[in-house]
Amino acid sequence: MIEVKDVKKSFGQKILFECKSLIFGKKGIYIIKGPNGCGKTTFLKMLFGKDKEYSGRIHNLFKKNIMLPQQPYFFRGSVEYNLALALSHERLKSAQEVLKMFGVPLKTNINQLSAGQRQLVSFLRAFYIPSDVLFLDEPDSFLDKDVKEFVYRLIEDEAQKRCIIVVTHHQSATLRGNMIYFENGQIIIEGDVAR
């Protein structure tokens, strides 16, 4: 569980956003939406514990946290090598099956892939690491429609077992879950504007 209470994020004198009260449960999908530059990624980093420069309280009770950043880091080497460094044998096999399904060559150097293929590799690498909570920053960037729909289904199925927090700017995203919006500097959860 993550509890957010009276949080305010500022840059100098300017308040970027504030959140009165928000709770992320042990399971389920939480989708954070809002216009570019409103602070979605910053808020995700705060929840993850990477950004501690704010007032108020964020209490993260999850033991194992995994985050997929917007610009993931890759090691020099093949797709398979980049996955094998992070994943157990069983989970590596699952990731390889998905990549084969979408025609991503496992022995190819990671830098020779398209942006969409690299995005899929980075998503699978984060997704298949066991964790209590998974933070995903724009996991659908550069993905074509079929891959995107497959990724959304994976996320929805997995959310039966753990908490997944997703930042997206795609207004047409078909991912279903608890909607959290950035509106006029306020973080609001759908259906509860009092928060």
Image (cartoon, grey):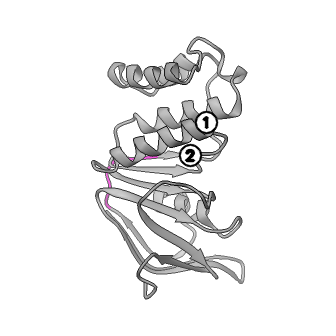
Query: Which amino acid, by three-letter code, is at mark 2?
Result: Pro
Query: Which amino acid, by three-letter code, is at mark 1?
Result: Gln
Secondary structure mainly formed by the magenta segment? loop
Sequence order check, earlier mark of 1 and 2: 1
Q: Which mark is residue 93?
A: none
Q: Which residue in the structure is indicated by mark 2?
A: 139
Residue 51 vertical position relative to residue 14 in the rendered view, above or below? above
- Name the quadrant containing residue 95: top left
> Is label 2 in a helix, a strand or a loop?
loop
> Is label 1 in a helix, a strand or a loop?
helix
Q: Which residue in the structure is indicated by mark 1?
A: 119
* Total number of numbered discs in the rendering: 2
Residue 22 vertical position relative to residue 31 in the rendered view, above or below? below
Check whether the beta carbons of the residues at disc 1 and disc 2 lie within 8 A of each other. Answer: yes
Looking at the rendered image, the quarter that the N terminus falls into is bottom left
Where residue 49 appears, x then y in whole percent? Answer: 48, 58
Image-based side of 91 in relation to 56, left or right:
left
Q: Report the residue at 51% width, 18% height from top.
A: 100
Q: Report the residue at 34% width, 38% height from top.
A: 130
Residue 133 vertical position relative to residue 74 in the rendered view, above or below? below
Range of residues picked out in magenta: 61-66
**Dot 2: within a 10 Å radius of its alpha carbon, few (fewer than 14), some, or many (20 or more) residues?**
many
* Of 50 and 83, the residue lying toward us: 83
- Name the quadrant containing residue 105: top right
Q: Is residue 64 magenta?
A: yes
Where residue 17 appears, x then y in whole percent? Answer: 60, 77
Q: Report the residue at 51% width, 42% height from top.
A: 149
Where residue 35 appears, x then y in whole percent? Answer: 67, 68
